Amino acid sequence: MSEHVLVEREEGLLTLRLHRLDKKNALTRAMYSRMAEVLEQADNDPSVRVVLITGGDECFTSGNDIADFLQEPPTGMDSPVFFFMRALFEMKKPVVAAVAGSAVGIGTTLLLHCDLVYVAHDAKLKMPFVALGLCPEYGSSQILPQMLGHAKAAELLLLGETFSGEQAAAWGIANQALESGAATLAKAKEMAKRFLHLPPKAIADSKELMRGPGREQLRKVIAEEGALFNQRLRSPEAIEALSAFMQRRKPDFSKFA
């Protein structure tokens, strides 16, 4: 719901804060819709110069709310999650992220589309798509092999291995790892506010140039991933994995070839 996405404004800085702490900021359809709306409005509002995305000092997001996801899974690119993906992907203004605690699934892949990322050194990032019978999303199947090489990307995307904020910074997924969630948020705000004193059109033009090479290919990859992700949601493997998650048991994939 919209009360789970807080919007704070300070001069030209708009902060989008996930606020569903009792559920570790697990994302619902309503939250995706609200985030997409906020990002689109911010990108078209001349008074907004930079956007900061955070979950607070303790938890970024545990990823999709599985119960909400299963109740009404995405069926196409007009689903709320894809509205959010497009809104962030198309942002002309700079986007800064502050990550503490868990960043699971899209909580990690969305960082690949932010301009600056700051993490707590002990943050826990993870992309457990395959373990849930799904596939990588949001361009991660292209971006991470290009960034890290196939072998390391396979550990993260195929095995779904958890990695720390320190590792994220060392690998270039984040700009810097800091000692605590509070320090991370403070640093992200400090860096976001630097954009307030720079010419906005020059920032937008420069961001577009940086993203230009391969952008159309990445857009195509995101669409292909999304279509396959939607198919896999209805696969026997995903049904078993997600059912096991809800039932708090270990999934049994022995019957699948």
Image: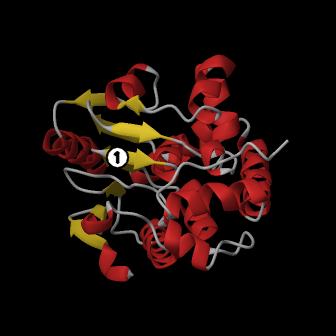
Residue that numbered label 1 is attached to: 102
Relative to 253, say whether 82 is above or below: below
Per the image, label 1 sits on a secondary structure element best described as: strand
Residue 97 in sight from this viewpoint: yes
The C terminus lies in quadrant: top right
Q: Return the residue nearer the eye: 15 or 41.
A: 15
On the image, the x and y values in percent for residue 13 come to: 27, 60
At x 32% / y 60%, what residue is drawn?
Answer: 24
Relative to 207, say whether 168 is above or below: above
Q: Return the residue nearer the eye: 51 or 232.
A: 232
On the image, the x and y values in percent for residue 167 come to: 39, 23
In the displayed structure image, the side of residue 30 where residue 61 appears, left or right = left
Q: Return the residue nearer the eye: 155 or 184.
A: 155
In the displayed structure image, the side of residue 2 where residue 33 appears, left or right = right
Q: Which colour scheme is used?
A: secondary structure
Q: In which quarter of the image is residue 217?
A: top right
Q: Quadrant of residue 71?
A: bottom right
On the image, the x and y values in percent for residue 93 come to: 45, 55
Relative to 70, say whether 108 is above or below: above
Residue 198 in sight from this viewpoint: no
**What amino acid is at disc 1?**
Ser
At x 46% / y 25%, what residue is drawn?
Answer: 172
Q: Which residue lies furthest to the right in this view?
A: 257
